[in-house]
Image (spheres, rainbow, N blue to C red):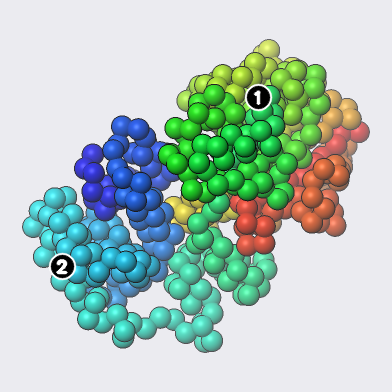
Amino acid sequence: MDKNPRLTAVSILNRVVKGAFAAPLLDETLSGNYPLEKQDRALLTNLVYGVLRWQGFLDFVIAMIYFGDAARLPPGIKNILRVALFQLFFTERIPPFAIVNEAVKTAKLLFPGRQGLVNAVLRNFIRQKDQLVFPNEQYDPIRHLAVVHSHPQWLVERFATIFNVTEARAICTANNEIPPLTIRINSLKSSRVEAAEALLAAGASVTPAGLSPDGLHLTDLPCPLRELAGYKTGIFYIQDEASQLISRLVSPSPGDIVLDLCAGAGGKTTHLAELMGNCGSIFAVDIKQERIAELGKTAKRLGIEIIRGYVADARAILPEPIPRLFDRILVDAPCSGLGTLRRNPEIKWRLKREDISALTTTQLTMLLNAADYLKVDGKLIYATCSLLPDENEDVVNEFLRLRKDFQLCRPNPAIPAQLIDQRGFFRTSTWRDNTDSFFGAILTHS
């Protein structure tokens, strides 16, 4: 791949348009095999995530300055324009003529013959930028929020209905911010204090996480995170602070038998094992073989031996030899992911209003299936990274209506009290807590 960060950003964005996610593409690109200076690596990351966060705003501008039907522009051309416009709006140190020239060079390489179009559109923007008109906040606050804060209008409408317009603005603003780089310390290999000292000695700036006792926030890394010795030796795992708290919500004990019904690549699964002191059994289920394989690699790196991975559909009867008597069951359900938009901004452009009902049906089916595998007096934990009631309390309420032998249980006192509402639901909020937005509920079987 070319070493030019702007060309590379466009190439990554073109793959995102086809359904890939930006984070793994950037991880792959910024591995040790891709020799970019630290400044260019930061620029590449900023361009990719910046364009994805501000895509709606940038497309609104393109529609105003393009002399044809912007909807018919090829996605690759549109990504070149987005990258250039993002720099013109949100960066100060790069002269406009240099931004335009780089965009023209990129178009010439990727779309020979279309560089004139790119040049004309961008120069048209430079001429007209002071005359651009955006939706009026007073007369149409929802449309204004959707455009100026770069979110799909249907989603802004949902936020405003669930909360209010002021809160919706706070949510959208927070979603467009750069999230902190947070890691979870592996208690099987180090304490948080020891790990912080080692990271400081390596040249990183370190701050203890305020909500998770296992978390550290990092800045000013001397090298890519995965190239630090502590990562390779399993001292830490990259994980948002709110996500870390879900395993604390499960609160397993050493020797427990635990079922993680939607394990994914194993962030919460491995944390559960650490909380159990690597003593007991965890049955990790996911529908995709590659995720279970990745979980196996992660567990090995972290020094965990109690996890057994299974490929299975969490909506159906699980295969033998998975037992039916678990002390703890975690259903970290597949969801909209709307609580992670700072980290995965492409989600807001892919998700459709009609997708939510299908997700809630799957969530309820998984939760009902999980209930049959729990011991009497065991705990069933339901979690999502969404802030929509449809996926959260509505699913739990329907479950309780159908399974009257279950009841809500308040989290243990180790969970910060400000994250628990009156009913006992766990919630974190991007715009209040500077974490991903997570929901959790503890259900007990009596």
Residue 123: x %, y % from top left:
19, 74
Q: Residue at x 79, y 34 (%)?
A: 251
Mark 2, residues whose alpha carbon is within 10 Å: few (<14), some, or many (≥20)? Answer: some
Relative placement, left or right, of 156 versus 409 is left
* Res 216 seen here: yes
Looking at the rendered structure, the kind of residue marked 1 is Lys
Residue 1: x %, y % from top left:
23, 39
Task: Examine the image and state in which quarter residue 328 appears.
Answer: top right
Q: Residue at x 29, y 76 (%)?
A: 64
Which mark, residue 189? 1
Q: Nearer the viewer, residue 321 or 211?
A: 211
Q: Nearer the viewer, residue 7 or 323?
A: 7
Task: Examine the image and state in which quarter residue 97 appears.
Answer: bottom left
Q: Nearer the viewer, mark 1 or mark 2?
A: 1
Relative placement, left or right, of 268 versus 147 is right
Q: Residue at x 75, y 25 (%)?
A: 276
Residue 332: x %, y % from top left:
65, 38
Mark 1, residues whose alpha carbon is within 10 Å: few (<14), some, or many (≥20)? Answer: some
Q: Are marks 1 and 2 in contact (CB under 8 Å)?
A: no
* Res 395 seen here: no
Look at the picture and state if 55 lies above or below 193: below
Residue 298: x %, y % from top left:
55, 25
Relative placement, left or right, of 138 versus 27 is right
Single out the residue that lies furthest toward the left. 113
Secondary structure beneath label 2: helix
Secondary structure beneath label 1: loop
Look at the picture and state if 10 lies above or below 287: below
Mark 1 / mark 2, whichever is N-terminal: 2
Q: CA distance from mark 1 to mark 2?
A: 55 Å
Looking at the rendered structure, the kind of residue marked 2 is Asn
Relative placement, left or right, of 155 versus 325 is left
Which mark, residue 119? 2
